[in-house]
Amino acid sequence: MTHHNCGVKVEVPGKIPIKPKTRRKKHDCPCPPKKQAAGCECNVKKPALEPAKLTNDCVVVNSLVGTKTVQKVAEVTLPITAFAGLGVLDDLVSVNLTPNVDAVTQNARVIKDKVVNIGLLPVTITVSILGIELPVTLDTTIPFQEHTDFPGACPQDIVQETPLEVEGTFIQPGVPVIGAAGIELVEGILFKVVLRTTITVTRPVIQDSQGNICDVNPNRCDDTNGPPSFTLPAPPNGGLLG
């Protein structure tokens, strides 16, 4: 009879205990875990951390240009004809505005002493109309743009913003707006959302072992080529959701 045991003495009645022919090394144990001998232990050690090798004693760090909490306002006025079945303002029973800040599209750019932010806020507008059983829903986007003063900021600085939070929503029926024909004013509804975020502007600089600092790009604030010009990417489907 063949005995499949790993590193264990085999005893046969009436005979001297037999040792395994081959003594396995401590880390050489092919047997299943339940049959492994107590001496078969594999201790895996993590590789020791080694200090990074630097070419010099200078490092690049981010210097804070400024940080501030600001408000952004998304606003649009839609004609009442944008809602199917709403012909006159007197038939408007109720209107509700629900913004979706998780799907906002925005672009931020730095010019001298300012941060310019342009974006679109997705919203769902629900309107209850007299004589119509079910509410009418419109999914669309509301544009916003803000210019925030940041003294000392220059193009090529880095802009970071915290996720947008809604501070309040405002609805004003009866605001005149140019109609679909683009000729005359018609009755409309104004929608406004006030948003809050914290803008932080940083700049990469070089710091030596004595704490001396110099700019990675010493010419970042030079305006020799005139004011910068930006073309921002278009939002999906032109910003239309509905």
Image (spheres, rainbow, N blue to C red):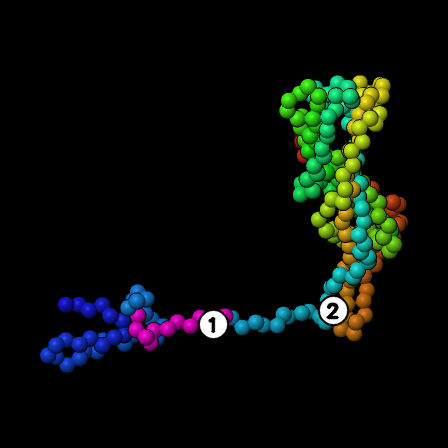
Residue 26 lies left or right of residue 12; in this view the side is right
Magenta span dominant secondary structure: loop
Q: Tag count in the figure?
A: 2
Which residue is tagged 1? Answer: 45
Name of the residue lying farthest toward the left: 14
User: Vertically, is 38 above or below 69?
Assistant: below
Q: Secondary structure at mark 2?
A: loop
Label 2 or label 1, whichever comes before in sequence order: 1
Residue 67 spot, x, y in % from top left: 80, 56
**Closer to the observer: label 2 or label 1?**
1
- Crowd rating for badge 1 (residues with CA inside 10 Å; few <14, some 14–19, many 20+): few
**Residue 44 magenta:** yes
- Crowd rating for badge 2 (residues with CA inside 10 Å; few <14, some 14–19, many 20+): some
Which residue is tagged 2? Answer: 58
Q: Secondary structure at mark 1?
A: loop
Specify the segment rendered in magenta. Answer: 36-46
Name of the residue lying farthest toward the bottom: 16
Residue sitting at x 76%, y 73%: 209
Closer to the camera, 235 or 156? 235
